[in-house]
Amino acid sequence: MGVTAPSVEVDRDKCVGAGQCVLAAPHVFDQGEEDGLSFVLAGAPGPGDDPGIRDAAARCPAGAISVADEPANGEDA
Ligand code: SF4
């Protein structure tokens, strides 16, 4: 316990570079300059802190974004 696992992931094999995720949650997602594929920014807030993440997952036309539930804030090891 106490280990923070990535709670938001982009499957870059599915991503088609539509950019909906970046529009929905610009503090969480960015697109590679060369391949245009989305990735999760380092230090990005989790889905509990940015409702745009779930919006991004819902808007992604490729179903490339997976969001895992996080433990509530303050829950510790
Ligand atoms: S919305 Fe989906 S397909 Fe579009 S860039 Fe983001 S992850 Fe890729």
Image (tube, rainbow, N blue to C red):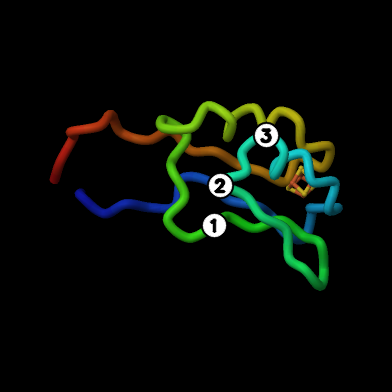
Which residue in the protein does label 2 denote? 28
Type of amino acid under label 1: Leu
Which residue shows up at 44% across the image and 40% down it?
46
Residue nearer the viewer, 26 or 61: 26
Instruction: For mark 3, give the secondary structure.
Output: helix
Q: How many marks?
A: 3
Instruction: Decide if residue 9 is on the left or right side of residue 62.
Output: left
**Label 3 amino acid?**
Ala
Q: Mark 2 near ligand 1 (CB under 8 Å)?
A: no
Q: Which mark is residue 24?
A: 3
Separation of disc 1 and disc 3 at Cα? 14 Å
Tell me the kind of residue under disc 2: Val
Residue 56: quarter of image: top right
Q: Position of residue 25 (x, y in %)?
A: 61, 38
Dot 1 or dot 3: first in sequence order is: 3
Q: Image quarter for residue 62?
A: top right
Q: State the residue position of label 1.
A: 41
Q: Residue at x 72, y 38 (%)?
A: 23
In what element is the residue under mark 2?
loop
Q: Residue furthest left?
A: 77
Dot placed on the residue nearer the N-terminal end, 2 or 1: 2
Asked if disc 2 and disc 1 are in contact, CB closer than 8 Å, the reply is yes
